[in-house]
Amino acid sequence: MQIDLRVPVGLPVPQVADFIAACEDAGFDGVGVHDHPHSGRDVYVTLGLAAARTRRLRLYPATSSPAVRHPLLLASAAHSLEEIAPGRICLTVAPGFLAVRSIGRPRARLVDMRAAVLELRRLLAGGTVSFGETESRLRNASPRPTPVYLLAAGPRMVELAGEVADGALMLVGLHRDAVGAARRHLEEGARRAGRSLDGFRTIFIVPIAVEERVEAAWRWAQRWFAPGHPWLLYPSASNLYWLRRAGIDLPEAVAPETISDGEAARICDAFGLFGPAERCLDRLVQAREEAGVEHVFLFPAHTLDGGYDMPGREVEAFARIMRPRLPR
């Protein structure tokens, strides 16, 4: 299996780059760094410094929104990283959540994401793109275009990924029925576009909470991400769609405090990795065996206030317990 980790810009940029280098030493295959311009720390500067300090790690923003950064700027940044770490970069894009809020804009619409992904792929391949009445291209491009991945949380976005992107970061949980449903949506998008999914890369975003007591980890399903925003609905209510595919039917206006302990356990088991490191490992191997999950992006569970905490516990648990026993 390939295992990536979400790392925030929760420290000064040089220290984040050092942390990412430690992730490589711990055995991770990749690191995605969140793109929060309002943090005052730029993700592409951070990734550039990390690229110079690592040898094999896959690196990417997790994720950038074309509603915040123009596609030409995103393509230029991605190619610049490609020149520092050839073959180790991918560009991941999404409608946006906290980043678009910080500039007072709504999330990008489905039609906007379709246009942005197509523009990015064309620019990175050396082609010309029209922005209004202006034609633009990258003066420098790589022989191997940097792949463009779409963050897909809802079924329509999953289909769009299958239609236009090089790959998808899918937040659908780990239950085999939910994973199977997501793959069917990918295939539907590819069918509409008349394209094959051969070579298409799928990365599953997997929430993780490493706790000594599994009951403490299950509490995440009963928490609020922010006032008025349940953790279960972060980043969107599409989480409920995939839980229903897994046989867990929750109301759209779910109040986390009304979720029973037993129901919280079922939710967490279907949605991610929760509990002691050994249990997280077993669940991950189960997802590989039952659902064919081969590549995951570990996304440490957090609230809005804790979004910049560095995932030291996850790195330590992975290096000491999970990585040595994972199938390679």
Image (spheres, rainbow, N blue to C red):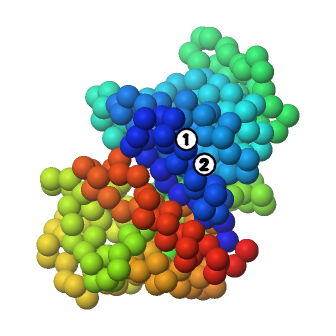
State which quadrant residue 237 falls in. bottom left
Find out whether the residues at labels 1 and 2 contact each other: C-beta distance under 8 Å.
yes
**Residue 36 to residue 132: above or below:** below
Q: Identify the residue at the far top of this view.
A: 133
What residue appears at the point 68 percent right and 45 percent down from the top-left corner? 54
- Does residue 289 sit above or below 187 in this rendering? below
Instruction: Identify the residue at image location x=50%, y=75%.
Output: 174
Residue type (three-letter) at the residue carrying disc 2:
Ala
Q: What residue does disc 1 label? A: 17
User: Could one spot residue 20 in this view of the protein?
Assistant: yes
Type of the residue with mark 1: Ala
Residue 32 picture location, percent across and down = 54, 49
Q: Is residue 117 above or below residue 243?
A: above
Quote the CA–CA distance across marks 1 and 2.
6 Å
Q: Is residue 35 above or below residue 127?
A: below
Residue at far right of view: 143
Q: Which mark is residue 79?
A: none
Q: Which mark is residue 21?
A: 2
The residue under the point 46% across, 78% down is: 277
Numbered disc 2: secondary structure: helix
- Decide if residue 122 is on the left or right side of residue 214: right
In the drawing, does residue 45 fall left or right of residue 208?
right
Near mark 2 (Cα within 10 A), the count class, few <14, some 14-19 or many ≥20, is many
